[in-house]
Image (cartoon, helix red, strand yellow):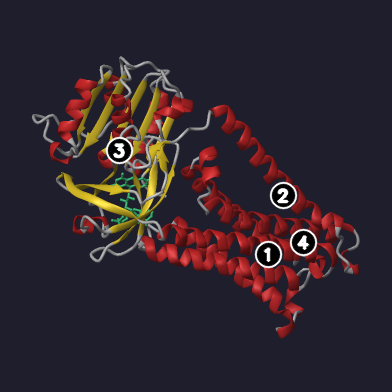
Amino acid sequence: MTAETPIGEAKILSSKTRFVLGGICLLILLLLLAGAISIPFVFDSPSLRYKLGFKKTLLRTGQIFGTVAATLLLLQLVLSARLKLLDRIFALNRLYIFHRVNAVAVGLLALLHPLLVFSTTDLSNIPVELKYWPEAVGGFLLLLLWLVIASGIWRLFLDIHFDRWWLFHRIATFLAAVLMVLHILFACEIFEQGLPRTGLFMISGVYILFLGWVKVKPLLRNKAPFLINSIARAGVDAYAVEFAPPQKTSFRYTPGQFAFITFRSKNLSSEEHPFTISSTPTRPENLLFTIRCSGDWTNQIGRLQPGEKAVLDGPYGQFSHLAAGLHCELVMIAGGIGITPMLSMLRYMADKNDERSITLIWSNRTRKDIVFADEFDELERNLKGLRILHVFTRESKEAGGGGRLDEDQLDTLLQDCSRQSAVFICGPPVMMAEMRRILPKIGFSHNTIYWEKFGL
Ligand SMILES: Cc1cc2nc3c(=O)[nH]c(=O)nc-3n(C[C@H](O)[C@H](O)[C@H](O)COP(=O)(O)OP(=O)(O)OC[C@H]3O[C@@H](n4cnc5c(N)ncnc54)[C@H](O)[C@@H]3O)c2cc1C
């Protein structure tokens, strides 16, 4: 690699290394949870009325739910901080899934915490007084947590714009962390003094430092923006945007990975959006993204101008044939613009003279929606093992349309493919869910199905 071509291929972690590192991460998490669970046992409640019997069990269980909920809430920042190491071990999409599941776990534990702690108290006799503000903070925190969880789950149903939701999510979760520390410090007897209180201050300090670093990282990236080399049509409603990296920057990726892009353009708002890198690292002279106009913001992508700047955060993801082994047969199923990671992989394999058997099923609404039609013809000629099967959902039968992919159609199209093949699926959520349901039914193994969702 020369100094003029800072783009190149990244090394992918072997599954053995990922397994070991994943195990270490899990161990650290279990140790943290064990620490959180042990706090109510090691630091007994000083209150006399909870010294014995069933009340003590209820209080302790409630306290455990509280400390575990607090630990899991702090974990949320780590899961969503886009840490490259965690991405290489687990892949960002899995971390986001864990983030969502963890959020519901935090919400449930946080709900059970006051129910158990107060279960032995007659709340009707408690006067509304200012001195109970820490408990009120706890109540507000619970409400806030469930507001964040519900808005995340029902964002699409409630028709909340992604960027508005994202802003609310960030402010609300930060506020939740602050309220949580206040609630623990002033409402919980265990944390009134000694080691628990000191420990809480230390953890809060580490959290603030980590949060500061997460916030500073984008500012550093802003100082080294990429330049738009060219922007060209890649189909009826798609554009290919080519970038040149800044001087002295190293951008290494594996085919199939994606990056978050923020354009600094006078014609487009500076929202951050994820896009797959559709070029191949074997051609370090260009870094290409193919973007379909599919919403408010992407509809304006054609207004970008060469020479304008963009900030790239990435690469991320493990949706790559390189993760599946060097020689195994490949099946790729793409829906619409979900072809971009496959395009990167195919371009890579063509440059490497890969001769393995590859079956690409590509579902588009109509023939007109195919992007890079000529290049796919050329790839089919250059890659000896490649077979491309087009499916059109909105063409008439005479024009080759066959409706949506279903079990019978998929079984027929894939009848010559080994059931040990590594299968890559990328497309609209409904199609992906359908493919993941059908493929095991027609003999493919869950373990060799890789998928990338175009939504985080
Ligand atoms: C890993 C990944 C790779 C992708 N690769 C490509 C690609 O190669 N080519 C391509 O055309 N599209 C790709 N997408 C989809 C692309 O990111 C969305 O189409 C785009 O963000 C939609 O923005 P919009 O405002 O125009 O549409 P909208 O209609 O406003 O949004 C549609 C949906 O896109 C998602 N979305 C919107 N804004 C954001 C955001 N800022 N961050 C994250 N998600 C958001 C939300 O789920 C939203 O509901 C990819 C998505 C992901 C997650």
User: Which residue shows up at 73% across the image and 77% down it?
Assistant: 124
Q: Residues within 10 Å of mark 3 (few under 14, many from 20)?
A: many
Mark 1 residue type? Gly
Image location (x, y in percent) of residue 295: 26, 56
The residue tagged with tag 1: helix, strand or loop? helix
Q: Which mark is residue 199?
A: 4
- CB contact under 8 Å: marks 3 and 4: no
Mark 3 residue type? Ser
Mark 4 residue type? Gly
Q: Earlier in the sequence, mark 2 or mark 1?
A: 2
Towards the viewer: 127 or 69: 69
**Mark-to-mark CA distance, 3 and 2:** 41 Å
Q: Quadrant of residue 318?
A: top left
Residue 27 relative to residue 392: left or right: right
Residue 262, relative to residue 359: is it above or below? below
Mark 2 residue type? Leu
- Report which residue position mark 2 lands on: 32
User: Which residue shows up at 30% across the image and 29% down it?
Assistant: 346
